[in-house]
Image (cartoon, rainbow, N blue to C red):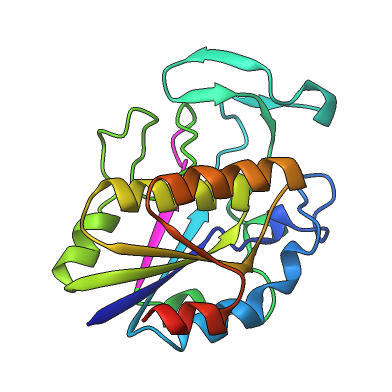
Amino acid sequence: MTIAAIDVDPQKTFTPLCPNELPVAEGDTIGSELNRQAALASVRVLTKDAHPHNAVWVVDSHDKMLSPLDHPNADLTWVSHAVPGTVGFETIPDLPAVTEYDHVIWKGIEPDLHPYGACYHDLQEKLSTGLIEWLQAKAVKTVLVGGLATDYCVKTTALQLQTSGQFQVIVNLAACRGIAPDTVEQACIEMKAAGISVCDSTEAVKALL
């Protein structure tokens, strides 16, 4: 059985290392757990937000965030984050170099696209990033998902993979951090309802393999 580990957006933009972007508490501490998870897999995938500074959804302060937008593929406002060439774009400590991964997905490069999941460029989930197809080509049957943040990009990526009907999807909460306890709890409810296995540790993940 071929297993893939997917590191979803483990970038400094989502950590206290970049307090002016979208910091998630302890987001910079999950690198070692992502590595432990990857040790259970035969291929490892990295996904990264890669946003232009002039995206249609950019606002200049945190108090203006989360306002609805009338754009088909950018639903909410956010402060600028994960701009290539900045510290926020970089991966968190303890992870391998980008070139040491087996596959990399960059998402949100276009100024009018702000996807959350790693499987589609658009919010309608019609324009594939190629992730599902790549996993199929590698004969992957099980995917282990961790990263940032649990209640946004991790959840959406896991749901997209589950909806494809091609994989056993396991989310390792020890290798994730979320924005708020209530939204993380809701994300876990949604993922479990979809048939995704949600585990609290890499040891629990191992027991499912």
Please tell me which residue lies in front, 84 or 184.
184
* Relative image position of residue 25 (x, y in whole percent): 81, 57
The residue stretch that appears in magenta: 103-110
Quarter the C terminus occupies: bottom left
Pinpoint residue 40: horizontal percent, then vertical percent.
Answer: 42, 86
Left/right of residue 44 with respect to residue 89 in the rendered view: left
Magenta stretch secondary structure, dominant: strand
The residue under the point 32% across, 52% down is 162
Does 194 sit left or right of 66 as displayed? left
Q: Quadrant of residue 18?
A: bottom right
Quarter holding residue 78:
top right
Say whether residue 202 is visible: yes
Q: Is residue 113 above or below residue 7?
A: above
Let me know if residue 17 is in the magenta part.
no
How far across and how far down the image is residue 201, in percent?
Answer: 60, 76
User: Quick check: 27 above or below 139?
Assistant: above
User: Is residue 114 or residue 180 the one in the foreground?
Assistant: 180
Please, which residue is most extreme toward the bottom here? 39
Please give left or right for residue 185 compared with residue 101 in the image: right
Taking the spot 25% from the left edge, 53% from the top edge, the residue there is: 130
Residue at 36%, 39% (x, y): give it.
121
Give yes or no for residue 107 being in the magenta stretch: yes
87 over 36 or under it: above or below = above
Residue 199 horizontal/vertical position (percent) = 55, 68
Q: Is residue 96 visible?
A: no
